[in-house]
Image (tube, helix red, strand yellow):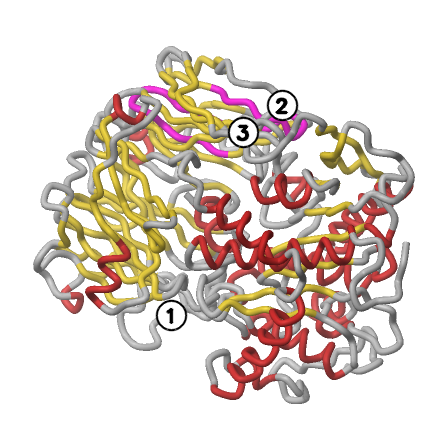
Amino acid sequence: MRKAILAMIIGASALGLGGAAVAAEAGGDDPYIWLEEFTSPRAMQWVEAHNARTTAALEADPRYAAYFAEALKLAEAKDRLPGGRFINGQVYNFWQDADHVRGIWRRTSMASFAAPAPKWETVLDLDALAASEKANWVWKSASCARPAERRCLIELSDGGEDAVTVREFDLATGRFVDGGFMLPKGKQRVAWENENSLLISREWAPGELGRTGYPYIVKRLKRGQPLSAAVELYRGDPSDGGYGVTPNVLRDGENRTLAVIDRPLDTFNAETWILTAKGPRRVAIPAKAGPVDMVAGRVIIQIREDWRPTTRTYPAGALVSVDLAQLKADPAHLKPTLVYAAGPREAMVEASASKGSLLVSTLDNVSGRLLRFTPTATGWTRRALALPANSTLGIVDTNRSDDRALLGVTSFLVPPSQWLADAKTGAAREIRRQGAKFDASNLVAEQHEAVSTDGTRIPYFLVHRRDMPLNGNNPTLLYAYGGFEVSMTPSYSSTNGKLWLEKGGVYALANIRGGGEFGPKWHEAGLGTKRQIVYDDFAAVGRDLISRKITSPRRLGISGGSNGGLQTGVQFTQHPELWNAVIIDVPLLDMIRISKIAAGASWEGEYGSVTDPAVRAFWDKTSPYQNLRTGVAYPQPFIFTTTKDDRVGPQHARKFAARMEEMGLPFYFYENTEGGHAAGANLRQTARTNALEMIYLTRKLMDPVEPGSTKGQ
């Protein structure tokens, strides 16, 4: 549960003073503090002027129209694989294309979904809803009350923000329920306790949010009650860190339930509580552990630090099970059973239960495997599902009423496919494959290693033409993330394939520390003041690409978003000599004021708090906004953000660009006025962003002489 929330939350950018702290904690001597007022007329005027400058330059390129048309065609392709969720005996899917810009929520039978051309029935048309209500609705999610799954809570966002409005929807009538559950806009967490009762964490009274901007009070709301009548069940503390107190209800295939409260102390450490007839009781598991699912009366717990509850130590990165009845009776004294333990080059990615089995997606040296675990009287049996090798394997959804599971298979060069599996037997069959979106006949994908500053070997993937000359002149794009235990794995990108690889570009994906590719320790190696090693890993991969004569600084570009935008921002300031193109997407860049911007205070477990002198000293010399210098030959970056991003916020990107402008440094800046913490609120906006960035990369890295520049090869 906690890892899913983290993935949602982050996913996931001093004149001549160098490392000196320029922006005081209160922003007193920060000349661009006004850009933090993200919707003020003055700030939006600045955004509009810089958007116009960037689009005028890049959209004037004679290739832009073709790039945009291709990006839009790929984004709206009707043969894209439809994601699926098992709900009430049918498969539901949210879908956007040229005819459904905001999107439709639709359904089909299981038999139809497994057929080559499913016959869909529209359940909710978001374009029609937005038009009728004159609202800027963006789809976020739907959760349905089990076991009947007749009523669902639909989360809708204004323009793509994380804050949502929640409304109850009846699947039988295809309408929102008159007098049903309705929660006004806010950053909130909601779980069905049963069909007539919700567990809710939200801002109950004005200002009743924690210091990180997330709720800390859980209440029960029963059908027919106003919000004011909700009964408090649990209260955290306003000083807590992390992403807010979160209720959840685990339910297995036999309809056994467990109501869980997750109270984060920081980004990764939390207390786990369960709701009982006698009130909330704390569960005696490590702070870096939490329940992820439940199957056959066994609660599955993922642990991210070594745990010794009895005479046995369970290693970080393992899955264990605890008997539900025993947990409820005595949550302070647990007797776990090992389900899965990772090997030295392995990591668990996700786990999801069907009616009687547990599916676990893992990585083995960053190659996907899918394992099935079945409970027995003495433990668990394990079996690997027969799926394509050298791929990323994902669990799209599992069915609690039977053992069916929908799986996704993807890799760099083979179009993605969907598989239908029987978790009980382990049998799996491919039900559809997306058509090829680019010519991969002369492309190969390889795995290499670079050596970082401390001698650690850092793996990275390389995708290139089979006949690529080793002359140091190949246009190369390097991507990494390096944070929040998020793993970067091979995936099929239509846009990268068509607009980059097919045109002769090389693509590199680095598995640097800070991610989860090799489990919790790989992540923890780069936490807080240890974070410089993450940036060293990335630079080491860049140097390795150069030393192998794959590319050169003139032809090497980098890209990253969110925490990855912080990564490229640091690389921009620390190693400007290594790159000729730098894409800084929806970034964190002012690490001194991060806790004052959007949801930044919730990530102190990852980055540390500048109230700690050691952390402050580290970011004083590392934070990109504070470390721009005059007299340095920086490459011209492409800085992208969105106005509606209430997670990272557009403030970081704006202030960084403003400081570059003050110093007379060239840059491209583009801010989408919708889309939240993403490239756009719809496919057309996303296509425009992709086209702008691809034109930028083409001009910087592929052209013999960069347009408007005297810089040659």
Give the image quarter of residue 449. top right
The numbered disc on residue 415 is 3
> Does residue 212 lie above or below 30 as drawn?
above
Q: Residues within 10 Å of mark 3 (few under 14, many from 20)?
A: many
| 1 and 2 marks in contact (CB < 8 Å) | no
Q: Position of residue 215 (x, y in %)?
A: 36, 64
Residue 64 position within the rendered picture, expressed as x and y whole percent measured from the top left:
62, 58
Instruction: From the top left corner, tell me how far across and down residue 610 is, in percent.
Output: 65, 70
Residue type at mark 3: give it. Pro
Q: Nearer the viewer, residue 107 or 347?
A: 107
Q: Which mark is residue 209?
A: 1
Check if residue 22 falls in the magenta segment: no
* Magenta part, dominant SS: strand
Q: CA distance from mark 3 to mark 1?
A: 44 Å
Callout 1 secondary element: loop
Q: Which residue is pictured at 51% across the width and 57% down the height? A: 679
The residue segment tinted magenta is: 350-371
Circles 2 and 3, Cβ within 8 Å, touching? The answer is: no
Q: Residues within 10 Å of mark 1 (few under 14, many from 20)?
A: many
Q: Which residue is mark 2?
A: 390
CA separation in Å, label 2 and label 3: 13 Å
> Can you say whether 180 is above or below 22 in the image?
above
| Circle 2 SS class | loop
Observer-side mark, 3 or 1, equals: 3
359 is within the stretch colored magenta = yes
For image coordinates 73% across by 59% down, the residue present is 582
Sequence-wise, the earlier of marks 3 and 1 is: 1
Q: Does the image show residue 323?
A: no
